Image (tube, grey):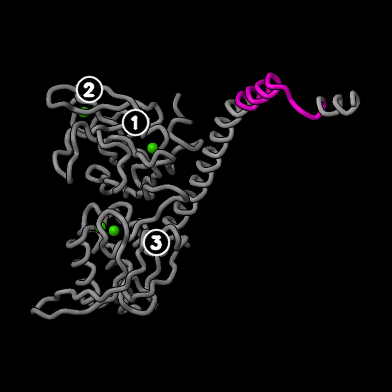
Amino acid sequence: MTVNHGIQRKRGMTLVELLVAISIIAILAGILIPVIRSAMTRGQVASVKMEIASLTTAIESHKLKYGGYPPDGSNPALVIQHFRNMFKRADAVEQAILAYLVTTYGLDPAESLVFFLGGFSENPLKPLTGPGGPFSGNRKSGIMDFDPNRVTSTGQLSVLSVPLQGGNTIDIKVVASNDTDNDPFPTYLPANLGAPYVYFDSRTYPMAFYLPRFQPSPQYQSVASPYHSDHEIDTNNDLTDEEHAWINPDSFQLMCAGIDDDFGVSFFGSVIAGQQLPPRILMHYPSGLGHYFDGQNDVEVSFSAGDKSNITNFSANGTLEDDLP
Ligand SMILES: [Ca+2]
Ligand SMILES: [Ca+2]
Ligand SMILES: [Ca+2]
Ligand SMILES: [Ca+2]
């Protein structure tokens, strides 16, 4: 009997032992969970950085093939001009279709990345509506091999009647996007994130910005816009105003909002439905400082949390925060 009792005591746990074990597990979890989470974040940043490198290579290939960097859509006239340069034999109807879609729906700096790096038809007269073209109903892959699961496309094919000169129309096949505007121009999402990759062409840095559909907080709007460098310049012979050179002044900036899906706040004050945008905050890399003109003075600011987690084609180590001095 006594032997039996002894074995039972060894097998079981007293209440105190149980509490001690639970406390140890809780302490270990408290130590390990942040470590695991930060390792996952680092892994995600590294994979975004690799994808930004692939996008960079694709943009450079586009330039080699077509004689210039893709426009970012901020200036619709540049989009049409670049399309003409890309496809010199494209007929007038193709140009009219693109002009109609760009002016009606807008090609934003996230949509332009997918539009210009995706596939075009081999038919030189019909690069848009010919087989494999973006408005053929079955776009082939292009210079960038986009993961189809991360292109913001509904897959819903419909026929769109595009008005032409002289009162005529032409029917084209479009697939609706599932992003800010549900137009025929999709964007591209980084893996497991909600804000798309954004592309800014140096020709339109001063006017370019992107408003994502997902807003991290109802208190403010997340806005992507090109970054300045810390290098001071003087373009107007006035040393009292603060002017900085752009980052990558002759090429482009590629941006991912990072794990918070928040690009930061590029505009001071409210930004509602595209109205009341100014004054614009210009952020400087790598210092993490910035400034905006309030009408009378330059006001100094520094990176928001949203800026810090951004991953770009110019950030050396991953996020902008990783490069802060
Ligand atoms: Ca659009
Ligand atoms: Ca769209
Ligand atoms: Ca100046
Ligand atoms: Ca961010």
- CB under 8 Å between discs 3 and 2: no
Q: CA distance from mark 1 to mark 3?
A: 28 Å
Residue density around tag 3, few if under 14, some if 14–19, many if 20 or more, within 10 Å = many
> Can the viewer see residue 94?
yes
Residue lying at 17% horizontally and 45% vertically, measured from the top left: 274
- Residue 6, placed above or below residue 180: above
Q: Quadrant of the N terminus?
A: top right
Instruction: Tell me the amino acid under the disc marked 2.
Output: Val
Task: Please state the extent of the stretch shown in magenta in the rendering.
Answer: 10-27
Instruction: Tell me the amino acid under the disc marked 3.
Output: Leu
Could you say which disc has been placed on residue 284 in the image?
Answer: 1
Marked residue nearer the N-terminal end (3 or 2)? 3
Is residue 22 in the magenta section?
Answer: yes
Instruction: Tell me the amino acid under the disc marked 1.
Output: His
Residue lying at 52% horizontally and 38% vertically, measured from the top left: 41
Dividing the picture into quadrants, the one containing residue 15 is top right
Q: Circle 3 sits in a helix, a strand or a loop, which is it?
A: helix
Could you say which disc has been placed on residue 117 in the image?
Answer: 3
Residue lying at 40% horizontally and 44% vertically, measured from the top left: 256
Residue lying at 37% horizontally and 50% vertically, measured from the top left: 196
